[in-house]
Amino acid sequence: MIATMALKPDTAGLLARTPLFAGLDEASRKAVAGELREASYEPGQVIFSRGDAGSDLHIVSKGRIRLSVLTSDGRELSFAHVETPSIFGELAIFDGRSRSADATAVNKVETLLLSKSAFLRLLESHPSVGEAAVRFLAGRLRDADEQLEAIALHPIEARLARFFLASVRQKDPAGKSEKVTLALPISQSELALLVGASRPKVNAALQLLESEGAIERRGQQVICDIAALSGIGRLDDKD
């Protein structure tokens, strides 16, 4: 359900934590906040489907969203989970093309929406928003390059370590914690897709990380030791 209403007082603060708007000054963030709409979704609700027309980006303010695609045999495979303060669906405001994946609410979800028309208004009134968008897209490209490099050059345990560290950075951007607990409500098959490996190899790599003290698994939660993961993630041996 999408609604236009008075936004929460901490909306500008949430924007300051996002990878797109964090670099803006307070006045610009308030201008962005003034263009946002609120939306809420129930667990299991489809937010959008691959092929849908899209004109809004979403900023996650609460909950977790699964981004996935359907295989040729009809199986759903997740390639990412996003939560506060992540942004998804952003390509819609840049190229106006159809959605490239499915987005589904894992639990109760609330997002803030920015439409393409609102984004264009912001570009005219606040040029710094355009500069922030360029930096954001450059970051996305760098992340994609690093992911491809990791798949090509690094052993699976290093790929997994980097995956966990990236998730930790989302939850603890200040990097003040020595250990961070992550929710990981995805199967090993989905995790294998994320790191470009087979399920048996991912299972073996998880056991290795656990034996090295880099992670501790408790059901759908993973306790991450930042120092240990960082050491493993810097490995550069070929797989």
Image (spheres, rainbow, N blue to C red):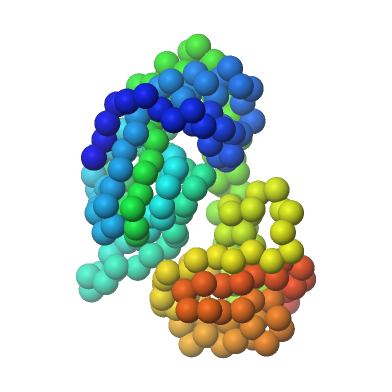
**Relative height, residue 224 to residue 29 (above, below):** below
Q: Residue at x 74, y 73 (%)?
A: 228
Which residue is most to the front?
Answer: 9
Question: Where residue 61 appears, x then y in whole percent?
Answer: 44, 43
Q: Residue at x 70, y 70 (%)?
A: 225
- Give the number of marks: 0
Which residue is most to the top?
Answer: 125
Instruction: Give the position of the C terminus as an image quadrant.
Output: bottom right
Question: Where residue 213 appears, x then y in whole percent?
Answer: 71, 81
Answer yes or no: is residue 158 visible: yes
**Relative height, residue 56 to residue 104 (above, below):** above
Answer yes or no: is residue 145 visible: no
Question: Where residue 148 appears, x then y in whole percent?
Answer: 57, 62
Instruction: Give the position of the N terminus as an image quadrant.
Output: top left
Q: Residue at x 44, y 59 (%)?
A: 81
Q: Nearer the viewer, residue 61 or 203?
A: 61
**Relative height, residue 58 to residue 194 (above, below):** above
Horizontal relation, residue 138 to residue 178: left or right: left
Q: Nearer the viewer, residue 157 or 211?
A: 211
Question: Where residue 226 appears, x then y in whole percent?
Answer: 72, 66
Horizontal relation, residue 217 to residue 48: left or right: right
